[in-house]
Image (spheres, rainbow, N blue to C red):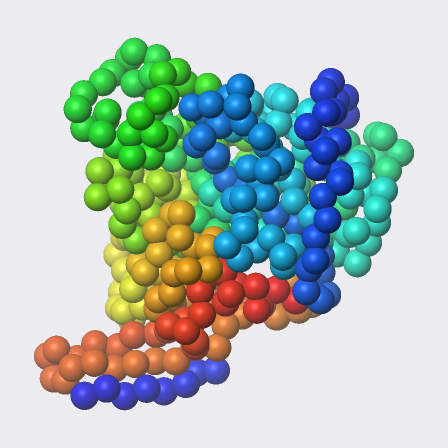
């Protein structure tokens, strides 16, 4: 039986060549009340091939499946550098000055981030007002971030990678997991891998003064033949654990971002759910239909559910229409909640549609 029911410190740049090229980019974004700025995640190819990396082209390629032609700007950054080092000084800072001078965010901007972009965004939110004011420029009006598979809480895989690549520990399971995640040519722990270690990530701008809502979109699917999941705490998307993507205030083994609904939409009590979140973090969408590298693309579709709904962003309600579905009967009766049209639209499309 199937029944459905609708419910309604100033930074001074030292090298500006790469960032200067980024200023030449053009975008053809659809009309939104707020401008969209993209911040990509870890580019593993830049870890394996630093000298051959083209940071700008890599950034464009990263988002080409769905978000490129829907955004107004991008902030690109190289994975072989550190967030509080050259990523901030040589890449983020020049871009922030450009965006400020263009008045792009005068009526409001939203950041759309994926993976480590979540952590880069947090450092920006914590510092951009001070940086820009000290330079005599107008701070950006960042009204919210939409964080897809966010790694703001770090990833245990980075802990494993740094340990293995510095010679501290190695075994066949570690070797297999790192080959799937980073590629077979990684020989040293560099750049943002150190920032992604769980304890390190949680020390980067942990309590920004700005009360910018961080809306979270969580994947819980399996990839890499399951080889990486064994190193991650609790439920995971094969790269980051739920404590990171949900925005939990501490690392732990969590099964869901919600105490009343599972990541597959099953409405039932969740004894291992996240109970405390980082400031202004709101997990909204969850899905076991997507893995880490699928949620920001257009090709994948599948049922998604909600953890929280109807979050206020500058007076705008951000939320999803949902419906409930009942399967089975008697002792086998189960109730699920899904976001409307999630079987027909990608997670990225659903997210884009609710950006004010």
Say which residue appears at 34% left-offset and 51% top-offset: 291
Near-viewer residue (322 or 16): 16
Rendered location of residue 293, percent (x, y): 40, 47
Say which residue appears at 72% left-offset and 43% top-offset: 25
Residue at the far front: name it: 52
Q: Is residue 115 above or below residue 271?
A: above
Which quadrant of the structure image shows residue 224?
A: top left
Say which residue appears at 46% left-offset and 60% top-offset: 298
Say which residue appears at 63% left-offset and 59% top-offset: 70
Which quarter shows the N terminus?
Answer: bottom left
Q: Is residue 207 visible?
A: no
Which quadrant of the structure image shows residue 257?
A: bottom left
Which quadrant of the structure image shows residue 94?
A: top right
All told, the count of numbered labels is 0
Q: Is residue 121 visible?
A: yes
Tell me: 286 left or right of 80: left
Residue at the far right: name it: 136
Near-viewer residue (47 or 159): 47
Rendered location of residue 356, percent (x, y): 66, 67
Rendered location of residue 165, percent (x, y): 33, 16
Q: Is residue 189 above or below residue 353?
A: above
Tell me: 233 left or right of 105: left
Tell me: 69 left or right of 26: left
Rendered location of residue 313, percent (x, y): 64, 62
Q: Is residue 299 above or below residue 136?
A: below
Residue at the far left: name it: 331
């Amino acid at each position: 039986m199937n029944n459905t029911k609708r419910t309604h410190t100033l930074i001074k740049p030292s090298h500006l060549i790469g960032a200067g090229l980024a200023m030449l980019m053009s975008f053809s974004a659809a009309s939104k009340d707020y401008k969209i700025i993209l911040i990509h995640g870890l580019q593993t190819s830049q870890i394996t091939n630093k000298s051959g990396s083209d940071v700008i082209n890599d950034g464009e390629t990263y988002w080409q499946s769905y978000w490129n032609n829907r955004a107004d700007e991008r902030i690109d950054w190289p994975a072989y550098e550190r967030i509080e080092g050259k990523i901030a000084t040589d890449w983020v800072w020049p871009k922030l000055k450009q965006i400020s001078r263009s008045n792009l965010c005068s009526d409001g901007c939203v950041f759309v981030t994926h993976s480590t972009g979540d952590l880069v965004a947090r450092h920006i939110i914590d510092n951009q007002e001070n940086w820009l004011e000290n330079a005599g420029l107008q701070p950006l009006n960042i009204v919210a971030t939409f964080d897809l598979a966010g790694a703001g809480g770090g990833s245990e895989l980075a802990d494993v990678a740094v340990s293995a690549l510095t010679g501290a520990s190695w075994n066949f399971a570690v070797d297999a997991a790192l080959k799937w995640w980073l590629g077979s040519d990684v020989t040293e722990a560099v750049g943002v891998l150190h920032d992604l270690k769980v304890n390190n990530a949680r020390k980067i701008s942990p309590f920004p003064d700005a009360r910018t809502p961080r809306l979270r979109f969580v994947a819980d699917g399996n990839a890499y033949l399951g080889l990486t999941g064994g190193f991650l705490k609790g439920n995971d998307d094969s790269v980051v654990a739920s404590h990171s993507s949900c925005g939990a205030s501490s690392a732990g083994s969590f099964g869901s971002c919600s105490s009343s609904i599972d990541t597959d939409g099953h409405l039932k009590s969740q004894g291992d759910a996240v109970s405390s979140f980082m400031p202004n973090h709101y997990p909204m969408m969850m899905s076991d239909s997507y893995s880490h590298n699928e949620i920001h693309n257009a090709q994948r579709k599948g049922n998604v559910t909600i953890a929280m709904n109807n979050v206020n962003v500058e007076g705008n309600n951000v939320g999803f229409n949902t419906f409930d579905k009942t399967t089975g009967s008697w002792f086998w009766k189960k109730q699920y909640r899904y976001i409307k049209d999630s079987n027909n639209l990608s997670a990225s499309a659903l997210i884009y549609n609710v950006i004010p």
